[in-house]
Amino acid sequence: MLTCPACFQMLVKINVDSDESETMVCKNNRCLKSIFHADAKCPDCGAPPAKIMRGSNHYTSYLCENHHEFNEQLKPRPELYQ
């Protein structure tokens, strides 16, 4: 079994497109390397998040690599549940 290099939880296979190719992803919502935070970028400088500050069911607060705090709405990931 493959594990996430950041949080060491088990990776899961998902189908990303209609081409039936599978990708291994982390589904731990508290891990910065997970599918839930993959698209997060600081609106001020475009840097990826370096730390999760707070999280709820709908929004996550991050601290970017350049020390800007920002919030993003969690995006639904239906491909995890197919």
Image (cartoon, helix red, strand yellow):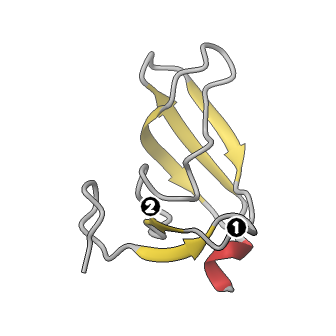
User: Residue 21 at x, y = what percent?
Assistant: 58, 68
Which residue lies under the disc numbered 1? 19
* Residue 14: quadrant of the picture: bottom right
Please state the horizontal and vertical placement of residue 15, each as a whole percent of the image. 62, 73
Q: Is residue 5 left or right of residue 33?
A: left
Q: Is residue 45 left or right of residue 63?
A: right
Q: In what quadrant of the picture does the N terminus appear?
A: bottom left
Quadrant holding the C terminus: bottom right
Q: Nearer the viewer, residue 65 or 10?
A: 10
Numbered disc in front, either 2 or 1: 1
Q: CA distance from mark 2 to mark 1?
A: 29 Å
The amino acid marked with disc number 1 is Asp
User: Residue lying farthest bottom?
Assistant: 82
SS at badge 2: loop
How many discs appear?
Answer: 2
Q: Residues within 10 Å of mark 2 (few under 14, many from 20)?
A: some
Name the residue: 45% across, 19% down.
Answer: 67
Q: Which mark is residue 58?
A: none
Residue furthest front as drawn: 19
Q: Is residue 81 above or below residue 44?
A: below
- Which amino acid, mark 2? Arg
Query: Which sits earlier in the primary sequence, circle 2 or circle 1?
Result: 1
Dot 1 alpha-carbon crowd within 10 angstroms: few under 14, some 14 to 19, many 20 or more: few
- The location of residue 79, given as percent across then percent down, is 68, 74
Location of residue 76 (image quadrant): bottom right
Circle 2 residue: 30
Measured as percent of width and height from the top left, residue 77 is found at: 69, 68
* Residue pictured at 72% horizontal, 61% vertical: 58
* Residue at image coords 48%, 76%: 13
Say above or below: 54 vs 64.
Answer: below
